[in-house]
Image (cartoon, rainbow, N blue to C red):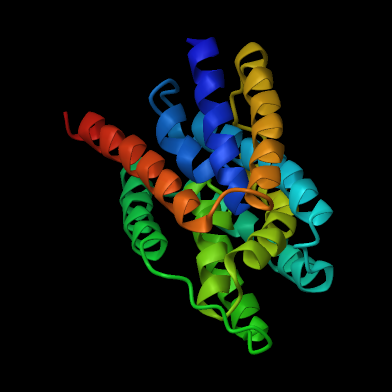
């Protein structure tokens, strides 16, 4: 089981690394198939994976010159401050409600991935993007997935091209993912022999993904691959919840 899950995480990390979003959004439905406790097992592990994958994805985008350190640093401060608010809230509500919010978020992400990109070079509204980062950080901390999967679409919507958005996002997501783990710290239940291979696979996959994205892979293909993985995992999890 561990070998299969590690291989799955490697593939997911490569794809998420291509978009700089961190692996947690795609990892949550996969991990929930193996781990029974959403808040104390799945979410903290997903956030740790998200931080690791974002950090190594950042290395790839930075090497290719796609990271705006000043703007990305501002986003990192915003997301790091507000993500723990959502994580703390997750301990106060039913897991059923968390899954409802998760599935709504899936619908939004899929809608965004199917839309054509409309970058506005030199006319990006970064202030609006930073403002949107506040509710995004709280919501994704609540879901245990890190802000990346919503922050990249938000940055694209305010005018940034996807690769630039991915580079800034990778910087913003790294510290916020780790800060969002803190409210889970006292109650989280992690398995060393299961989790360490997943973290190593996530690190390797995200670095490979970022390197591929900045050199060879067309963005349209990236979106289709990510869309297929997220939809497959989420639909399977929905069937399991209903059954």
Image height check: is 59 above or below 157? above
Eyeballing the image, is 61 above or below 115? above
The residue located at (70%, 25%) in the rendering is 200
Residue 231, image x, y percentages? 33, 43
Give the vertical position of 86 relative to 11 (above or below): below
Q: Is residue 91 visible?
A: no
Note whether 125 is above or below 25 in the view shown: below
How many marks on residues?
Answer: 0
**Could you tell whether 175 is left or right of 177 in the image?**
right
* Front one among 180 and 148: 148
**Closest to the observer: 40 or 25?**
25
| Displayed quadrant of residue 110 | bottom left
The residue at the point 45 percent across, 23 percent down is: 35
Query: What x and y, as percent, mark residue 21?
Result: 59, 52
**Residue ranking furthest to the bottom:** 123
Q: Is residue 72 left or right of residue 240?
A: right
Q: Nearer the viewer, residue 121 or 195?
A: 121
Q: Residue at x 67, y 16 (%)?
A: 192
Task: Residue 100: give x, y in percent of width and height.
Answer: 30, 51
The image position of residue 82, as x and y in percent, is 64, 63
């Amino acid at each position: 089981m561990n070998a299969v899950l590690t291989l799955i995480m490697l593939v997911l990390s490569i794809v998420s690394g291509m978009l700089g979003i961190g692996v947690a959004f795609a990892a949550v439905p996969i991990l929930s198939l193996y781990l029974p406790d959403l808040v104390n097992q799945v979410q903290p592990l997903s956030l740790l994976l998200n931080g690791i994958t974002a950090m190594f994805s950042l290395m790839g985008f930075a090497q290719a010159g796609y990271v705006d350190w000043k703007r990305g640093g501002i986003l990192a401060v915003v997301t790091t401050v507000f993500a723990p608010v959502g994580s703390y809230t997750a301990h106060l509500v039913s897991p059923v409600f968390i899954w409802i919010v998760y599935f709504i978020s899936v619908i939004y992400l899929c809608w965004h991935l199917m839309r054509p990109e409309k970058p506005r070079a030199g006319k990006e509204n970064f202030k609006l993007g930073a403002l949107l980062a506040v509710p995004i950080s709280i919501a994704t901390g609540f879901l245990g997935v890190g802000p990346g999967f919503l922050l990249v679409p938000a940055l694209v919507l305010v005018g940034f091209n996807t690769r630039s958005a991915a580079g800034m996002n990778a910087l913003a997501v790294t510290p916020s993912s780790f800060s969002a783990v803190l409210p889970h710290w006292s109650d989280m239940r992690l398995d060393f022999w299961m989790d360490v291979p997943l973290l190593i696979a996530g690190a390797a996959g995200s670095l490979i993904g970022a390197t591929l994205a900045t050199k060879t892979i067309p963005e349209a293909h990236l979106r289709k691959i990510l869309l297929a993985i997220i939809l497959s995992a989420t639909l399977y999890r929905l069937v399991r919840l209903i059954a």
